[in-house]
Amino acid sequence: MKRTLAVLMAVAVAAAATGCAGKGQQVSGEGNKTTAEADAKSGSAESGKKYKIGFANASISNSWRVKMRDMLVAECENLGVELVETDAHDDANTQNSNIEAMLQQGLDAILITPCVEDAVNPGIEAAYESGIPVIIFDRTCTTEDYTHFVGYSDKQNGAECARMLVEALTERYGEPKGNIIALDTIAGSSTDNFQKEGQDSVFSQYPDIKIIARQYTDFEVSKGKSFMEDCLAKFGSGEIDGFISQDGGVTLGAVDAINEAGRDKDNIIFTNADGINGVVKLIQDGSCVGVTQFPCAASVDALHMAIACIEGTDPEEKDIMMDSIVVTKDNVDEYLIPDGDDYDWTY
């Protein structure tokens, strides 16, 4: 079942209307979407209030980020929220400057997706010191000066992908062993840092599973394809058992390289930490063991949280973290878009 953080917010808001208060524990759960979205609508559009909310976006450098932004813009229009947005093009200095500029525009709250974990701290801290609610989502930061983080765990997603790959290699060989390639994302980003931490928490238990090559791909399809081409040239048939990827487009690029090199008969298996349609299709043919989902609607959940903060109905918990959504052959039909484009997002 596809889930959003609005589910958890509804439960938390019902339990506590304590304003933008101190730090709590990470929580997880699911249920029916009820009061969170309704409260957001009644607090802005229906009540006649019009909030002005900033969005300091890391970038729109890949299709996930484009859809994430589009969903946020649509929900702001739906709720009558004035959105002030900036694009940092994945540059921390630019993002800090963008935040400082937006703080001069009379915002009621600000949403921030840090392009890297630590270098955007000055902008985040400046926003927090200004007294408005600061909602971090998608990527994390290393400062504690924010109001809430809402999102899914990259560390858990990385661990789930590694676990699925270990299980598939064990099924193939009767024991956990094999040579794998790792396709990473952006150096220094929380996405990459935590995905690798999650992967390592699993792979470290299996010394006979070896990462024989890894590369940053910056979420770029061409870089994923190029690096896989290099690996195929370096390692002969039977020397690569699988790969683990943090991005769907990068995965499709790598699969193209394998097919174009005539290495599809090598039965190279893989897992992937997002669920674009083309990768979900590959679960059906068995080459993709499974994916974890990172919903584009995280931006909508962050918006609802910002409105709850403005109205004093946000939860006590500071960090709101949902469990990973894992897609395998057992539930792939719930996510597959049979006639959809390979780059359609399935959540």
Image: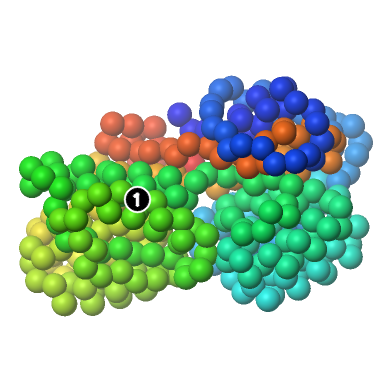
> In this view of the protein, which residue sits in the foreground, 66 or 93?
93
Q: How many marks?
A: 1
The structure residue drawn at horizontal position 9% and vertical position 71%, both measured from the top left corner, is 236
Query: Circle 1: is it few (<14), some (14-19), or many (20+) Cα within 10 Å?
Result: some
Image quarter of the N terminus: top left
The structure residue drawn at horizontal position 69% and vertical position 54%, both measured from the top left corner, is 144
Please tell me whether residue 216 is drawn above or below residue 46 in the rendered image.
below
User: Which residue type does callout 1 highlight?
Assistant: Ser
Residue on which the image places disc 1: 201
> In this view of the protein, which residue sits in the foreground, 48 or 22?
22
The structure residue drawn at horizontal position 40% and vertical position 44%, both measured from the top left corner, is 292
Relative to 326, is 176 on the left or the right? Answer: left
Q: Is residue 274 visible?
A: no
Q: Is residue 136 visible?
A: yes
> In this view of the protein, which residue sits in the foreground, 100 or 275?
100
Q: Position of residue 28 (x, y in %)?
A: 54, 32
Q: Position of residue 5 (x, y in %)?
A: 60, 36
Q: Position of residue 24 (x, y in %)?
A: 66, 37
Which secondary structure, mark 1? Answer: helix
Name the colouring of the figure: rainbow
> In this view of the protein, which residue sits in the foreground, 96 or 82?
96
Q: Position of residue 120 (x, y in %)?
A: 66, 67
Residue 37: quarter of image = top right
The structure residue drawn at horizontal position 73% and vertical position 55%, both measured from the top left corner, is 145
Relative to 82, is 234 on the left or the right? Answer: left
Please tell me whether residue 320 is drawn above or below residue 133 in the rendered image.
above
Relative to 318, is 253 on the left or the right? Answer: left
Please tell me whether residue 30 is drawn above or below residue 52 in the rendered image.
above
